[in-house]
Amino acid sequence: MFVLKNTLLSFTFSTLCLSTSAAAFDIIAHRGASGYLPEHTLEAATLAFAQQPDYIEQDVVATKDGELVVLHDIHLDTVTNVAAKFPDRARDDGRWYALDFTLAELRTLQVKERSDTAGKQVFANRYHGSKALFTIATLDEHIELISELNREFNSNIGFYTEIKSPAWHKKEGTDISQLLLDTLARYDLNGGNANIYVQCFDFAEVKRLRDELGFKGKIVLLLADNSWGESPTDYQALLTEQGMHDIAKYADGVGPWLPQLLDMKALQQSKVVPASWLATAKKEGLIIHPYTFRIDALPTGMTAEQILGLLTGPLAVDGVFTDQVPPVKSFLQHSGK
């Protein structure tokens, strides 16, 4: 997460936050209600539904037997007890991969609050318990759950599904994008009017979804920092006028990392200026859904209200991924959004 100097706060943000937009602002429950329950579990999805966002996110990875499960990572060790359950199944890099396990095996694991590779809980004040049995669920189960809750409560909460590491899966012999499209077709979620976004960090795979696989639904290209090694995509080249033109040929929107929304050179001079690519993206009609607003991981020197004021005001993005839906909804209600 980015850092801002305290000198910015006295005037700049109070002024900018008064300039707010009346446009609709989408709230995307990031990995379900992940600020309150272990991420991507059915329980987290249920709680997210109760909080009534606009969309609930599902990251998908493939299993050894060709099923799609909802997990943020291709690895299992930071969110499950796989090391204790299957101590001899790690690869040479010391990591346990979902693709090396059948769905039946994955169902024996207990999902826990996310930890780092040293075993320390990443967000210290989130779920501490260890007795409740949270488990890995399939994409089919998540779709059924949200669809049934929508029917029973007369709601229309959408899906926001990410294809994780498609190039890696393909190298391992699995076409995860085709598996996803086959699943979406079973639920009539593959058309242009379906209430779903399919998202991916890999621009080559986004092009493939359109050109080779013929996906007609809405697509968001996620934007990372090149140093993360998220995919072969050159994100720096895409954060330009030409880059936005190229993205708009294939995608309906972009999902930038929050710092990518700001002109960092101006920020060094204590000025808050939208990044130049934003204007081009809006001109191209691209939806802008940045990630991730976390009430328990705010940038140094900023409040939650200042961040949300920027997003809904001068940056004028179309929504935000968040681990905590309630404070975002509260801000929008109190600011008249």
Image: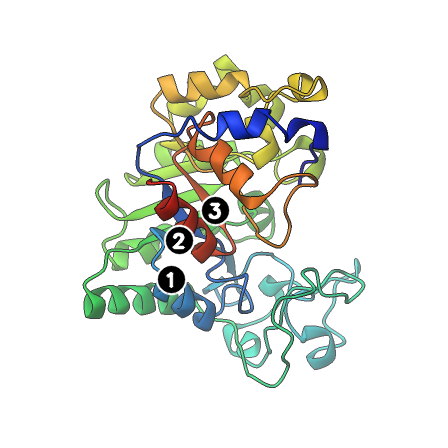
**Disc 3 crowd, CA 10 A, few/some/many (<14, 14-19, 20+):** many
Q: CA distance from mark 1 to mark 3?
A: 14 Å
**Disc 2 crowd, CA 10 A, few/some/many (<14, 14-19, 20+):** many
Residue at the disc numbered 1: 51
| 37 left or right, relative to 45 | right
| 202 left or right, relative to 21 | right
Element on which disc 1 rests: loop
Residue plotted at (43% across, 68% down): 138
- Quarter containing the C terminus: top left
Residue at the disc numbered 3: 321
Counting residues from the start of the chain, the first of labels 1 and 3 encountered is 1
Residue 71 is situated, as x and y percent measured from the top left of the image, at 54, 61
Residue at the disc numbered 2: 180
| 312 left or right, relative to 240 | left
Judged by depth in the image, the label closer to the viewer, 1 or 3, is 1
Indicate whether 337 appears above or below 132.
above
- Quarter containing the N terminus: top right
Mark 3 residue type: Phe
The front one of 221 and 210 is 221
What sort of colour scheme is used for the picture?
rainbow
Counting residues from the start of the chain, the first of labels 2 and 1 encountered is 1
Contact between labelled residues 2 and 3, with CB atoms less than 8 Å apart: no
**Disc 1 crowd, CA 10 A, few/some/many (<14, 14-19, 20+):** some
Mark 2 residue type: Leu
Q: CA distance from mark 2 to mark 1?
A: 26 Å
Residue 107 is situated, as x and y percent measured from the top left of the image, at 53, 78
Q: How many marks are shown on the rendered structure?
A: 3
Residue plotted at (41% across, 68% down): 47
Residue most extreme to the front: 10
Indicate whether 196 appears above or below 82.
above
